[in-house]
Amino acid sequence: MNILITGATSGIGQQLAIDYLNEGHIVYCCGRNLAALATLSNRFPVLAQNLSFDIQDLEDCRRALGELPELDLVILNAGTCEYIDASQFDAASFERVVRINLIGMANCLECLISKIAAGGSLSLMGSSSSYVPLPRAEAYGASKAATEYLAKTLSISLKKQSIKVSYIAPGFVETPLTDLNDFPMPMRVGVEFASDRIRKGIARGKSEIHFPKLFTGLLKTLGLLPFALQKRLLAKTLTN
Ligand SMILES: NC(=O)c1ccc[n+]([C@@H]2O[C@H](COP(=O)([O-])OP(=O)(O)OC[C@H]3O[C@@H](n4cnc5c(N)ncnc54)[C@H](OP(=O)(O)O)[C@@H]3O)[C@@H](O)[C@H]2O)c1
């Protein structure tokens, strides 16, 4: 397969790239970190193709992605996280998160949808934070809730082009991003586990891939409760 992965220079995206490369696929590895991209292409000459660009910059995306051949699988994984103190709401922080997680994704979609083969797949990286409103995740969670909506609408709109769209919603995964977190991260899994679940979910044509199931199942169940009850439960457990 011809596969493109954004955010292939670190964490979940890097592990996905390594695993698909080990399976013998051609992987277009995207990111800004040139040293990390070079490590992949040195380890997998020919199979790993490096594309360096900033997903926030539409012109940069067009330059890097314009000449690609047909793709069988696109995983838009690149993202970031900043937490917000609601009592001192920081609009600049909110904008940084939304620009990367949401606008960056839209920039990639503009450049890539027309390159996905009929019968191919498109996966958008969200987060299980989209299932319930989590304090301090006002920016991150909003960007991921929008990504969930985007994935679901695209899965309907692109059906006539026979493109399968999936929404990926991990719980906590051990990466440089979560290494920065200053709070307990229940049921945090490794990148190998995350990559395995994502690759299996995509191969099975799932429209939603969430893991670890115990954690994400709990959040999804909470999300089904009346909001007043969700609010009481979440405020009690997360703001004490
Ligand atoms: N780790 C978790 O617990 C967890 C849970 C749920 C969802 N997620 C989501 O999974 C995705 C990957 O997260 P991770 O934990 O693996 O984080 P990570 O290790 O920090 O990796 C983030 C990746 O995104 C790329 N990226 C960030 N900003 C970019 C930009 N402006 N242009 C191009 N690439 C950019 C980075 O590449 P460069 O620095 O090379 O540009 C890097 O490869 C994110 O969307 C995150 O929200 C993570």
Image (spheres, rainbow, N blue to C red):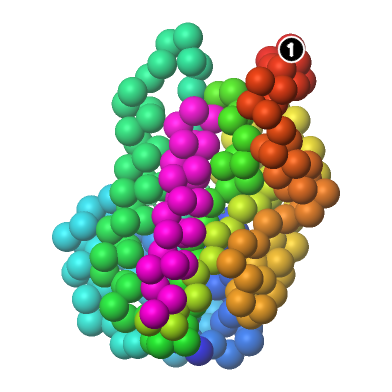
Residue type at mark 1? Answer: Asn
Q: Residue furthest front?
A: 226
| Camera-nearest residue between 133 and 69 | 133
Q: Find out whether residue 236 is within the magenta segment.
A: no
Q: Name the image quarter holding residue 196.
A: bottom right
Q: Main SS of the magenta segment?
A: helix
Q: Position of residue 47 (x, y in %)?
A: 48, 87
Residue that numbered label 1 is attached to = 240
Q: For the C terminus, give its image quadrant.
A: top right
Q: In this image, 28 relative to 206: left or right?
A: left
Residue displayed at 69% across by 74% down: 200
The correct choice, above or below, for 108 with respect to 203 in the image is above
Q: Position of residue 104 (x, y in %)?
A: 33, 52
Does mark 1's beta carbon lie closer than 8 Å to ligand 1?
no
Q: Residues within 10 Å of mark 1 (few under 14, many from 20)?
A: few
Q: Is residue 92 visible?
A: yes
The correct choice, above or below, for 217 with respect to 86 in the image is below
Q: Find out whether residue 142 is within the magenta segment.
A: yes
Q: Position of residue 192 (x, y in %)?
A: 72, 64
The correct choice, above or below, for 163 with respect to 188 in the image is below
Q: Residue furthest top?
A: 87
Q: In this image, 17 relative to 34: left or right?
A: right
Residue displayed at 57% across by 42% down: 130
The correct choice, above or below, for 240 with respect to 120 in the image is above
| Camera-nearest residue between 165 and 196 | 165
Residue displayed at 21% across by 57% down: 58
Q: Position of residue 107 (x, y in %)?
A: 28, 58
Secondary structure state at the residue bearing disc 1: loop
Q: In this image, 197 relative to 91: left or right?
A: right
Looking at the rendering, the stretch of residues picked out in magenta corresponds to 137-160
